[in-house]
Amino acid sequence: MEYFKKYDKNPVLGCETLGSMFDAYVSKENKMFRMDFSYRNKKSCAVSFSSDGVNWSTPVITLEPNPQSGWEDDINRNCVLCIAGVYKMWYTGQANGHSWIGYAESTDGYHFERKSAVPVLAFEHVWEGDSVMNPCVLYEEGKYKMWYSAGDTYEPNVIAYAESDDGVNWIKWGNNPIFACNKENYFEQDRIGGCSIIKTEDMNYLMFYIGYEDIDTARICVARSKNGITNWERSCHNPLIVPTPGEWDGDACYKPAVAWNDKENKWMLWYNGRKQSNEYIGLAECFVRNLFYAEQTEKSKCV
């Protein structure tokens, strides 16, 4: 059963004129969709808005690189939360083959200022390799919770977890990484990365993530956990989104950003598709709420 159907006029953001746009983070703001994403040609983070998730406003740069810092030659792969009127951005800074996570704030959601001259999260463990990147942050009961990717800079290998009281000083989970590839699944046999976390009442924490068959071939998958940290269960319907041969996303499908549309009772999933060196952002939709429903008894044991 095909759960997600791609929008027939994809991509919805990015083109040859504007250049590659990738790794979106989508939130709701004043009945609008807000998409924060990476703008490759500008080496910057940018934002766009939409009322329907399909037609997006002209991108506006929200944070530019800062080569003088020594770790922000390029910036990308960010997420943004608005808490008590303050926009908080966690972003990836890259330089010299490494990646770190930085932090910035804004009062209007457009113009962000760095609040730390040094990374708020850095690679330090063997399993983190050369990089930490792709922060996804939730704010729950006064606690900031971050899921991030770690490993190689070109494409990370695992997903890890950290917590903070202020969004700046982070304590990494003692049993990291919390999620790694399952080599029994061909579509993620090489590595996993780039997750989007959503907390639901009926399926607990959902992790939409990238599964890599090899370094150049990627698909989108989902898993769930009761606490968002341990005992992740993959969906039997993985992979959810796969490349369409010959199309704009024919080589790989990366970095999901997901929202549940209450009005139309559907999942909306944005992702960046790649064909050769071009990456743009597309949309897929699913009208089945439960992404873990097993149609057959033998499917109940998913790995």
Image (cartoon, rainbow, N blue to C red):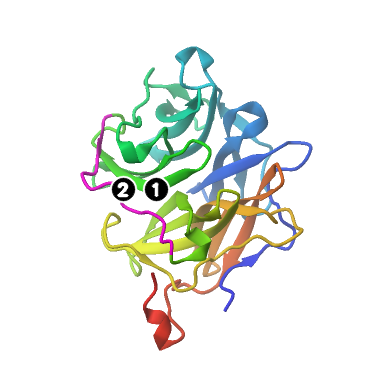
- Which label sits on residue 275? none
Residue in the foreground of this view, choosing between 301 and 13: 301
User: At numbered mark 1, what does the secondary structure look like: helix, strand or loop?
Assistant: strand
Instruction: Specify whether 34 is left or right of 59.
Output: left
Occupied quadrant, residue 148: top left
Q: Residue 196 placed where, x, y %?
A: 45, 51
Whether residue 262 can be seen here: no
- Majority secondary structure of magenta residues: loop
Whether residue 278 is situated above or below residue 268 in the rendered picture:
above
Contact check, label 1 and label 2, Cβ < 8 Å: yes
Q: Residue 109 placed where, x, y %?
A: 50, 33
Q: Residue 173 placed where, x, y %?
A: 24, 44
Q: Residue furthest top?
A: 68
* Three-letter code, disc 1: Val
Whether residue 161 can be seen here: yes
Residue found 31% across the figure and 52% down from its top: 178
The residue at which mark 2 appears reads as: 177
Does the stretch in magenta take in 119? no
Whether residue 103 is situated above or below residue 135 in the rendered picture:
above
User: At numbered mark 2, what does the secondary structure look like: helix, strand or loop?
Assistant: loop
- Report the span colored magenta: 169-183
* Three-letter code, disc 2: Pro
Occupied quadrant, residue 45: top right
Q: In which quadrant will I find the C terminus? A: bottom left
The residue at which mark 1 appears reads as: 158
